[in-house]
Image (cartoon, helix red, strand yellow):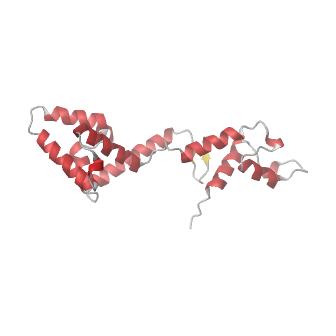
Amino acid sequence: MTLIPVAGSAALQLLLQRSQFSPLTVAAGRNATAEVVAAANGAVPASMAGAGLPNSRTEISDAIYSVNSVDANKLKVNLTERLGAEFGISADDFESASAFGTAIKHALDAMKQDDGWQRRVAEIERNLGLDELGISLDSFINALINSDNDDAAKLDAALRDKVDDDAQRARFTLDDIGIYGR
């Protein structure tokens, strides 16, 4: 069974790693535990002054809990909303993603009756970034209609890969033992 450290201890580990501070290296006569606890709670002990801990704490918090953090579900919701905007249909008007996907499918079928529909579909795929994900507009719509089909699995995998690629470029990453670092 793998134990997952609580957020406070992960942050504490990062603070310790960033400041090159270790309880084992505290000079004799200092209370190491008190200094570690103070650092974890945002107070900067005298022995660690100038180590940049207040900034580290803010950076850690922003990296972990920021509303700007992205996951595959947020990307999917964003893509769905943008798809609706392309067709002038709001996802909020439907009770389920399936009903929304069906309405989009009907709008796409109507679009396919016009000349130049292929160019318009390619434009929509480019605008949404589906071409970068390797997903066609039809596949995306099928994934919305039925979340248990191959198109949905392919979409979810592509979105997870996108999130993973973005995470690799992020300032903070999670290492093998669960510690955030640069």
Q: Quick one: 112 or 17, which is closer to the camera?
A: 112
The residue lying furthest to the bottom in this view is: 1
Which quadrant would residue 88 be assigned to in this image? Answer: top left
Q: Which x, y percent locates residue 75?
A: 38, 45
Q: Residue at x 61, y 50 (%)?
A: 179
Please say if 41 is above or below 114. below
Work out whether residue 181 can be spotted: no
Q: Which x, y percent locates residue 28?
A: 90, 50
Work out whether residue 108 can be spotted: yes
Which quadrant would residue 54 be assigned to in this image? Answer: top right
Please say if 149 is above or below 82. below
Q: Residue at x 64, y 53 (%)?
A: 10
Q: Quick one: 144 or 173, which is closer to the camera?
A: 144
Quarter holding the N terminus is bottom right
Please say if 37 is above or below 129. below
The residue lying furthest to the right in this view is: 29
> Is residue 181 left or right of 128 when viewed as pictured?
right
Quarter holding the C terminus is top right
Q: Residue at x 55, y 47 (%)?
A: 65
The residue lying furthest to the front in this view is: 93
Q: Which x, y percent locates residue 163?
A: 43, 45
Q: Residue at x 71, y 41 (%)?
A: 53
Q: Quick one: 80 or 71, which is closer to the camera?
A: 80
